[in-house]
Image (cartoon, rainbow, N blue to C red):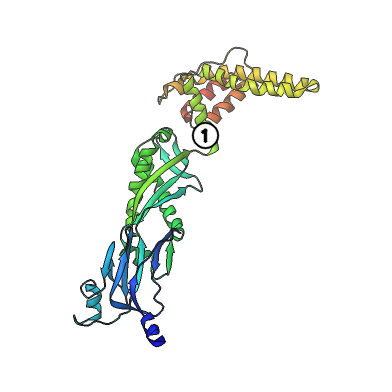
Amino acid sequence: MALMDFIKKQFIDILEWTESGDGTLAWRFPMAGNEIQYGGSLTVRESQVAVFVNEGQVADVFGPGMHKLTTQTLPVLTYLKNWDKLFQSPFKSDVYFFSTRQQLDRRWGTTQPVTIRDKDFGAVRLRAFGNYAYAIADAKLFHTSISGTRDRYTVDDLDGQLRGLMLQHISDAVAQSGVPFLDLAANQVEFAKQLQEATATEFVKLGLVLASVTVQNVSLPEELQKVLDQKIGMGMVGGDMGKFMQYQTAQAIPKFAEGAAGGGGGGGGSVVGDAMGLGAGVALGQVMAQQLSHGLQGGGAAAAPAAAAPAGLKPEEVMATIEKLADLKSKGILTEDEFTAKKAELLKKLV
């Protein structure tokens, strides 16, 4: 009796897989040297696919349902083994189960800023992150190109590769969307759609389908964000440079007040110095408003002649203005021609 029990254990008559929810994508049925009973049953649940591999070749693929393992249900395997139709004997074959349900909330994001072209800012270093979902669409291709003969293959084994594919196509997605950076935050759905379309083909090559993509955040590096904040501030005052300088001065007053309060009795000299610096900033802002009003409002190729510096402007104030102009040029707010023309006008005041 014990001998018969031992013999029975060598023949597997039920093959099935109950997923444990641990992120397994592919799982090999543990054969342990046993053979599959001819006429046995294969149970494939919804959201699963089973693949028979014989002598290194994919023989048959089974979708959801209960399948009797006979020469009729294993035609390819029958052909490979040259079975006679009356041959009814146990056989050896590797059986792999694949999960075809969607793998949700997989994260992608830029570890370093990605440089893209933008029609407003030129070259922009962009940061973005979000999530995506995918599923196995072609179990045979996934087996031959990804999971192979491993006993178990999980989403964690694949995440790094898929995340890299997402990041690789960010520039393509932005270009295809045609949405300027300033509008990306309000058009994240369109950005996500273009990113999905740009990446989907690469997923197909792995036997996968990219089911969905979301973009949760798009941002600039800190130094570019400051320039953007300045442009937003100008938009708040309608592009009027004089009002913009007043806006900046208003922003600086609370900091000045904090410095004055923190200086105490012994900080009188510092407070006076801050006040003088604030007054000089206001005067300089008025000069810059006159000098830059046309260049920043018109945006045309040819700038109107710069307004002359007010009478009584000191040489150090002229040089300070030139330095400010150079800073604006480096940030792309002024063109080279505008900067050169305004600098020449200011330098005449030093003669």
The x and y percentages for residue 14 are: 33, 72
Look at 50% across and 21% down and name the residue there.
Answer: 292
In the rendered image, the vertical position of residue 259 relative to residue 219, given as above or below: above
Q: Amino acid at mark 1?
A: Gln
Look at 42% across and 64% down and name the residue there.
Answer: 153
Query: Which residue does the numbered mark 1 point to in the structure image?
Result: 225
In the rendered image, the vertical position of residue 258 relative to residue 206, given as above or below: above
Q: Could you say which quadrant of the image residue 325 lies in?
A: top right
- Front-most of residues 324 and 310: 324
Q: Could you say which quadrant of the image residue 298 lies in?
A: top left
The x and y percentages for residue 31 are: 39, 76
Whether residue 2 can be seen here: yes
Classify residue 219 as left or right of residue 15.
Answer: right
- In the rendered image, the residue lying farthest to the right is 266
Please give the count of numbered marks on the rendered protein: 1
In the rendered image, the vertical position of residue 228 relative to residue 289, given as above or below: below
Whether residue 172 can be seen here: no
Classify residue 245 as left or right of residue 53.
Answer: right
Look at 65% across and 19% down and name the residue there.
Answer: 278
In the rendered image, the vertical position of residue 211 relative to residue 5, given as above or below: above
The x and y percentages for residue 345 are: 53, 20
Please identify the quadrant where the C terminus is shown. top right
Classify residue 280 as left or right of residue 98.
Answer: right
- SS at circle 1: helix
- Front-most of residues 7 and 349: 7
